[in-house]
Amino acid sequence: MKMQAVIIAAAVGVGTPVLAGTAYDEAEVLDVEPVHELVRHITPREECRLRRVPARIERRSGTAPIVGAVIGGAIGNAVGHNKRNKQVGAIVGAVLGGSIAADIASEHDRHHRHRGRAWERREVCRVVEDISHEEEIVGYDVTYRYGGRTHTARMRRDPGDSVRVRVRVTPI
């Protein structure tokens, strides 16, 4: 029985006698064809331009509301008739004067911004993607002969003149 298995193994081209199980051997490569595929490549890059953008408005000075509060307080104090009225008048005048001065300063800023004075040229950047397509080899269709038969397989690399094959022998 062992002799028959060795003879059968030799007949199908198995280099190492095998009774049952798996063995490895070499097969002759007949043809290798590279497999090409169109591959898309995306390359991000930064693109910058000078643009006209709204100017950054710096924090306004607190001078206008303070001066308005002082003036309003003085007027309120002067209008009051007795001591208690003068104190209330000064407080109310200071609050109103500060508020009025702040509103005037805001209106001034808004007016000048709309007249085009609050614009500046600044570098503005964004990321764009460059897309390219290239044909690349993604594998190889290999035709090889083993045991008197021709087989084809797709492989990652060009195997050269021979390819290693796994041979599994099972009894019938």
Image (tube, helix red, strand yellow):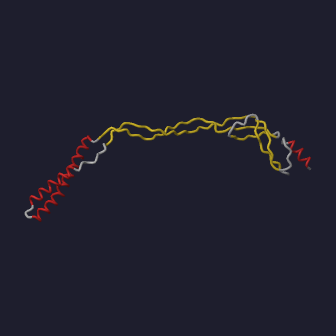
Left or right, 168 with reference to 76: right
Give x and y (percent) for residue 63: 21, 49
Placement of 27 over or under 170, stated as above or below? above
At x 77% / y 42%, what residue is drawn? 165
Give x and y (percent) for residue 38: 59, 37
Check the image and name the residue furthest to the left.
81
At x 11% / y 56%, what residue is drawn? 75
Check the image and name the residue furthest to the front.
83
At x 84% / y 43%, what residue is drawn? 16
Q: Camera-side residue: 160 or 37?
A: 160
In which quarter of the view is residue 81 placed?
A: bottom left
Give x and y (percent) for residue 62: 23, 50
Left or right, 113 with reference to 42: left
In which quarter of the view is residue 141 placed?
A: top right
Q: Camera-side residue: 14 or 99?
A: 99
Give x and y (percent) for residue 96: 17, 57
Left or right, 109 with reference to 172: left
Placement of 139 over or under 91, stated as above or below? above
Q: Camera-side residue: 26 or 88?
A: 88
Placement of 104 over or under 53, stated as above or below? below
